[in-house]
Amino acid sequence: MGADLIFNIFLILSVIAGAVVAFIVMKDKGVFGNDKANEKAITASASAGRVIDEKLLIDQSKLQDLLNIQEIDDNSIIHLKRNNGLRVIFSISTPDIYLLNDDEQHVFENALLNIALSLNFPVQFFTTTRKIETRKSSEKILGTVNSTDPKVSANLKQYSAMLYEQLLSIEQNRKINEIKNYCVVGVSNIFEDKRAHNELSARIETVVKGFTTAKIKTDLLEKEKVLQLLCDMLNRGDNIPIDKFMDDKAFESRYTTGEMAFQERTIGGNMNG
Amino acid sequence: MAKKVSDMDYINSTMLTSKTEFDAVLPDVFENGKDYIYLGADKYARVCVISLYPNTMYLGFLNDFFEINDINISVFVDHIKNSDVIRIITSKLATIESNRILQEKRTGIADYGLRQAVSDLEAMRQMIQTNNDRMANLQILITL
């Protein structure tokens, strides 16, 4: 009798212990779906009345985080989200070294070496190939072809039509690409804005002076062109015309995060208005 | 899955889903595979890094890569302090030189590979110490 009682008690205790262990393991694996993030979200949503797809919110913010870009200001300076980073992108066009004679190549090499020696900060060079874009030129030529102006001769229209066909065939030819070179200059970890901008200006000056000495043409990329470059990188093979979207005012607002907009609106007193 | 959210989350979500320039820039998908990145229908990218460089290089030695269509080459250059470079080279030089002496004593045969390495490092240290050259960390990434 005593042995049976002890055995039963031991059996009940082992079943309870097993259940507790199983519960802990399943909770750790999130089987019940009550992880900390969910609890926080549920608490936050307790007083709210709106309904939204949470998955959409998380995925889009993650994609934007990939770029690490806070905004691109009117001076074409890219503000990064982390380490108060600032970046500017130059497009650079170098002379074709195969068209230079030996002496000219030697001079060019020396000029590049001098640039390399003068730089005491990190620089990124980026080279990409992209399909040739003849849209703007083609549209102008097509305007001549379809012109009703009597001053435009039939010969000129015929020539323009042939030119238009040729440009289209170049654009559609997958084997013809243009090579674009870029140089990225930036500063990071300088948390005082004025100092960061001054340092960036000094670095830009060093780079541009060096390139000018080497007879390399530099051109600071404007906001549209920076976006176009990012777009070409992330949407390979698609020729998405960002400048056309911007001209058509397809975007309602400049790039900003929801949190910033929330703060601006709160400070402005429009939140409850 | 639809659920109730707070005012702050609602504003965040509506701003994130509003049409900005970055909506056109972002790809449809960004999925990291084992050795590739998936960027939407029929769009894949693979990033390679050049880990070993040739002994001698010439201007435009990467140009042949552009025979391949749709390629990006990114070169990161970050200069290293001369004092750090000299310290590293001296340490490497001592290691290689001691290895060379030990090996040549043991085998009695000259190791011309190690001798060349010693000679190269000494020349490099001389150039840096006389401020005629500098060293930089270089990383070349090729995206296909």
Image: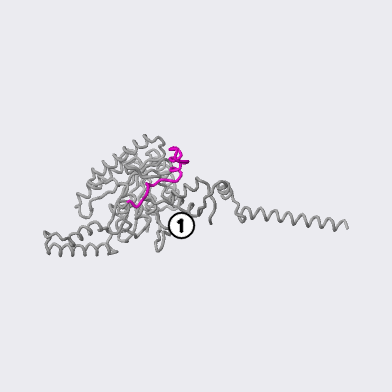
Residue A166 showing in the rendered view? yes
Q: Position of residue B3 (x, y in %)?
A: 54, 53
Mark 1 secondary-structure assignment = strand
- Per the picture, the main secondary structure of the magenta-coloured stretch is loop
Left or right position of A164 against A36: left
Is residue A208 covered in magenta? no
Residue sticking out furthest to the front: A273
Nearer the observer, B134 or B124: B134
The disc labelled 1 sits on which kind of residue? Asn
User: Which quadrant holds the C terminus of chain B?
Assistant: bottom left
Nearer the observer, A101 or B99: A101
Q: Position of residue A195 (x, y in %)?
A: 37, 34
* Residue located 39% across and 47% down the image: A255
State whether residue B92 is above or below residue B42.
above
Residue sticking out furthest to the right: A1
Q: Position of residue A17 (x, y in %)?
A: 73, 54
Left or right position of A62 against B135: right
To which quarter of the image does residue B122 belong? top left
Residue B123 showing in the rendered view? no
- Total marks drawn? 1
Q: How is the image coloured?
A: one colour
Q: Chain of mark 1?
A: B
In this figure, which residue is indicated by the disc labeled 1? B32
* Residue located 33% across and 49% down the image: A226
Nearer the observer, B105 or B133: B133
Nearer the observer, A222 or B78: A222
Q: Position of residue A210 (x, y in %)?
A: 26, 42
Q: Which residues are magenta?
A: A249-273
Is residue A262 covered in magenta? yes
